[in-house]
Amino acid sequence: MQRFLYNFTARHVPGIHEKTLISAVLLVFMATLVSLRAAPLTPAELMGRLDREIQAGLVKRDVAEQFGRYQAYATGRMDASAGSKRWSDKTGNCRLSYVDWMMRNQLKAPASAEQFTRELHQALSSGQTGLMRALDLLAAKVDLQPAAPVTFHGDTALATVSNVLTTATHLCSDALAPLSEKQLALLREKLYLLTTGGKNSLGAVWQGGKQARAVADALEQLDRQAYHQAAAVLSTLNDPDVLLQFKQLAAVGSIDYAGVEGALAAVQSTPDGVILVGGTGTNTYQLDTLTNVVAVIDVGGNDVYLEGSVTAQRPVLIVIDLAGDDIYRGQTPGIQGGAILGASLLIDVEGNDAYDAQDIAQGSCLAGVGLLFDLAGDDSYRALRRAQGQAICGPGLLLDSGGNDSYHAALWSQGVGSTLGIGVLDDLAGEDHYYAGGLYPNCYGDSPGYAGWSQGVGIGPRGTANGGIGVLLDGAGDDTYECDYFSHGGGYWFAAGFARDFGGNDKRLGSTRLGYDGLPRGERIFLRWGIAYGCHYGAGFVFDDSGDDTYGGNVVGLGFAWDIAVGALCDFGGNDHYTKIGSGQGVARQASLAILYNTGGDDVYEGTGQAMANPVVTYHPMPACGGNFSFLVDYLGQDTYGGITSNNCELVRQSPTGFLIDRAFVPSAH
């Protein structure tokens, strides 16, 4: 080989010395080897290493057959409650196949969750083509087909909007067509009241008993594919070429219109309602006074939008604001890209904007489509309940493309999916602050704290129906997360939740620091069920790709699973700090699988409760149910554990199914 290289090079580089050439070749070869070894593994590759580590550990300790019993038992419980079957208080109505698959394939679930969140964020970060791909990724997770290809280019900008309105209105009608008059009346009268309004404040319960079950049955009859198609149709207006068309509309206002403060540049009637065009001046739109208005396109100015509810009475509303520091404010449900039995789209292209609402708002839906796209600026989002990427029976999406943003809510917000819904909040860049909780009492009388049920959480209304899928994604920046009970990457009652941060030194504080109103808390700081948990046939996942991160909480969290569930917290880099938590870190109870996985960095694990696997199970029969399986796996770095052991070790934790594995290296792929 050396002689060949010398002869080949000598023909092209006359006068080169043989030893010089050989030395150069060896240096290049060694540098190539070093670079190959130093190349960081991708998250997908790291998840592959985790899977092999777990599989090998089960075999090494001779508990693989025991885990097989657990997985078979979990599968049997899913079978016993599928379709029209009932097992205890578990039923199969409104069950999503992706959640079902996760419960039946729990060792594969973490890698699937990593791939889903990564591909979804990549799509949402990739412009208009990516947005359409993202909608199809979401559709697949809630048992729907990809949307049919859609393009709308009218002769004028307003003709394009008119075409979109007509199509979206027809699709909303198609979605309701399978319902009987009785079912339709039930949803119109009771859907909001039983799921959100009234006395709803405990998290995973809908009010109304049998009537709530009838609501769930009606939701299951809806044509959800039509809603998904409506989401794709509305999203075509987010195309940069279409937005450029809007920017070229008349900018000078001269038309007075009842319900609008400030002059309009144009008013156009369509078969579906009136389209208003605001110019560069300041306008205030009384949207619920403008009951015949179905679209507002505003070219510029610091504008104010009041209310703007989307219900069966006005099933479609489009608001597009192209520039200015705007204010969106209201009290009625179904506003600011929120909808009840309809479809709503809000696009804000530029400016530092403020959104203030009560519930079903800011990319949220109850049986319908809720879309909010904010493309730039330091924005403030404030709401009470079911907001900021929340969905029941449909897609709810809040996409913020940049700026240092603030998200503030009390309950069911920031990427939450309940029955037949998929709710997503993705903030692509900036140093952001997420707050959820601080107002409503928690559902446990034996511990302090508030309810949260937010930040990448899937929830099933226990005793009524199965749950949905919630996703919270953040692209970059040093972010802060505050949340109360049952929040941040969790799944409860046949549901799945995902939270992922792709960059920055992030702080997951563990409980809100002040009350919802900004005043001192009435309850002491306490987070129960938070940061990567699965509970009662749920799956919850938290991923963090880089940065020096902190994870806080008090009890049952940081990779925790309870009662036929899977919870996984996976951090792929940085010097991370895991605070002491009552249940430990990476802990399973009542027949479940729990994982805390960390690669790279000098990490600190407070306390002594890592990877504890209690051999006692009281919810299910032993040994038939298999038991608890707990894993804490850490690769690389000089790590510190609270009083347990030195770095680089393999420990049995409480029983043979409790694994604490710390390695100074990342195992090979084979």
Image (spheres, rainbow, N blue to C red):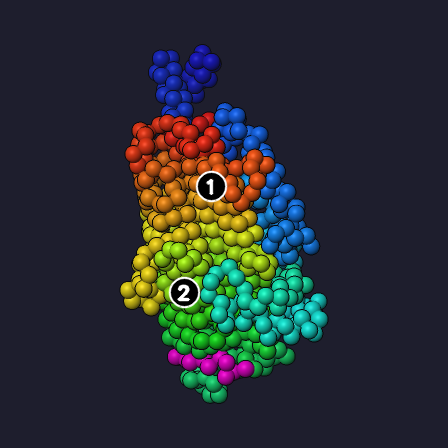
Determine the residue positioned at 64% across, 42% down: 76
Point out which mark residue 574 bears. none
Q: Which mark is residue 588?
A: 1
Span highlighted in magenta in the image: 281-291
- Prevailing SS of the magenta stretch: loop
Locate residue 319 relative to residue 666 in the image: left or right.
right
Q: Please tell me which residue is depicted at 35% across the width and 65% down the height of the picture.
A: 516
Give residue 625's position: percent from left, percent from top: 57, 38
Does dot 2 land on a helix, a strand or a loop? loop
Coordinates of residue 246 in the picture (x, y in percent): 50, 71
Near-viewer residue (294 or 384): 384
Disc 1, SS: strand
User: Eyeballing the image, is 623 above or below 512?
Assistant: above
Q: Which residue is tagged 2?
A: 440
Mark 2 vs 1, N-terminal side: 2
Q: CA distance from mark 2 to mark 1?
A: 28 Å
Q: Is residue 190 above or below residue 533?
A: below
Q: Residue 133 in the image: x percent, y percent?
A: 56, 53
Q: Is residue 298 magenta?
A: no
Residue type, label 2: Tyr
Instruction: Residue 286: say if magenta.
Output: yes
Q: Mark 1 belongs to which amino acid? A: Ala
* Image quarter of residue 443: bottom left
At x 57%, y 74%, the residue is 311
Q: Is residue 624 left or right of residue 631?
A: right
Percent of width and height locating residue 606 = 31, 40
